[in-house]
Amino acid sequence: MKLEVLTVNENQEGQNIIIGKIKELINYKNLEPGDKLPSERMLSEKFGVTRSNVRDAIQKLEFYGLLKSIPQSGTFVANIGVVAMNGMIDDILRLESPDFKSLVETRILLELKTVRLASLRRTKEDLQNIKEALDAYREKAISGEDAVQEDLLFHLSIAKASGNATMNMFMLTITPQIIMDFEKYHVCDKGQAVKGIKEHTEIYNAIEAQDPVLAKQKMKDHFSLLYQYCYNS
Amino acid sequence: MKLEVLTVNENQEGQNIIIGKIKELINYKNLEPGDKLPSERMLSEKFGVTRSNVRDAIQKLEFYGLLKSIPQSGTFVANIGVVAMNGMIDDILRLESPDFKSLVETRILLELKTVRLASLRRTKEDLQNIKEALDAYREKAISGEDAVQEDLLFHLSIAKASGNATMNMFMLTITPQIIMDFEKYHVCDKGQAVKGIKEHTEIYNAIEAQDPVLAKQKMKDHFSLLYQYCYNS
DNA sequence: TTTCTATAACTGGTTAACCAAATAATACTG
DNA sequence: CAGTATTATTTGGTTAACCAGTTATAGAAA
């Protein structure tokens, strides 16, 4: 198991080295926005690594919007300027993997905003989706079973109803880790089922009533316990 | 140019189809958390697509934390439960690409939080980094040149000082698109240089003084124009 | 000299064979 | 029969050849 983690880190480390070399190359060759990078074959030869590694590094930089690969044409630097390019690559290289506290902190921030936006923008269809998620959660919680999944799906349905694609995506990226950490640290113990149902229902009612202030307040109440759990440890 | 977009959409569409089939397979075979997926070769044969496509689809689900590939062993479903798995894959398949308004809305939310956290948690080293970014921005802005890059790098240095790895990463993911949209729509026109320098300096001073309330207020003032621009169009 | 066309070289993407490690199956030993 | 060593198979990852579209080049025609 430790070996696995080591392998991943080695790979990431190797990928970061290649990313650093790409950055150096952009500076050395004075490549400006829209300019073409040398071909993957040349880069792999120049860096002394395999072409797959180069492709993976490029893909990562493409994810962050710094490069853009066009089939049968080449890889181009994005239109963000060389200064921002340098700064952002430095940041990416030093980026550390998120801890649990950081995840929860971000989640609360996003939830307080998405619930407000959802109460303002939700369509009838959104409301129906939220209601279905709420019903599924209630049923599972009443039966005494673990309802962490249904809990989070309820919150995701609110994020979707917020009408903000970016926040929706961010919620999606942090939810799996949240679920696993919750079950790992036993954050949501049994016995809170009734309380959870009540709070979820109040949030739903506020969204239905299109009352953003109330919705945000109910969400804040809902997170008060988690908030304490996170900041007192 | 339109052809290019079409190609991308076709690829994404094809990838989404494969992701949907993987979801069906998990349900059909009643795969539970920790269970092993069929090998990539079998999946490619069963789905009638190339193995590379299967690998790409798996990689995407791995990014969202739903699958985990282990070399020479297999691909495993994450420990989040089948209910959450189904819900999240549905959300991922329906996920739309973020629009400019959604990006700005999210950015403002993140900035108001990171500047507050930065003023509470910043180290001396963080403060030094922010100051350097501020100086670079001031120098560029005074000279009358376009300083969008230095502007955003200043804000990224604050995000880094917030001590929240998740928010830092989210800021990194939206910044390139913000820069490109700013220059595309000419959001930051010339003549606001002096005003921008003043506002940035006030934000910096509040962070230095470790005054979270003031820092947030100054950031809000800084965004008031952008806020209007975004919500009145 | 300029413009157009045909050809050659180059590009990112795809494919199938190959690799080393992990696992399963088998054979051997006590 | 139990336990261990050995072989065979399966796995995700890697590699190098190949593909189809793009771009640069060269030459001919005007």
Image (cartoon, coloured by chain):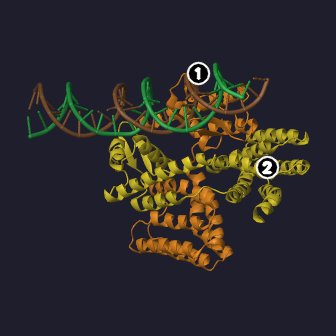
Chain colours: A orange, B yellow, C brown, D green
Find residue D1 and report its image quarter: top left
Find residue D19 and report its image quarter: top left
Q: The residue marked by circle 2 belongs to what chain?
A: B
From the top left corner, tell me how far across and down residue D30 is, in percent.
72, 29
Query: Marks 2 and 1: CB-CB under 8 Å?
Result: no
Taking depth in this image into account, of B62 and B114 the one nearest to the observer is B62
Mark 2 crowd level (few <14, some 14–19, many ≥20, 10 Å Cα): many
Residue hosting label 2: B207
Above or below, A129 relative to B130? below
Above or below, A12 relative to B14? above
> Residue placed at 34% from the left, 43% from the top?
B39
> Residue placed at 45% from the left, 47% from the top?
B57
Total count of labels? 2
From the top left corner, tell me how far across and down residue B116 is, in percent.
74, 55
Q: Nearer the viewer, mark 2 or mark 1?
A: 1
Q: In this view, does B112 lie to the left or right of C27?
A: right
Amino acid at pointer 1: Lys
Amino acid at pointer 2: Ile
Above or below, A185 relative to A16? below
Residue A43 visible in the displayed image: no
Q: In this view, does A4 lie to the left or right of B129?
A: left
Residue hosting label 1: A46
Q: The residue marked by circle 1 belongs to what chain?
A: A
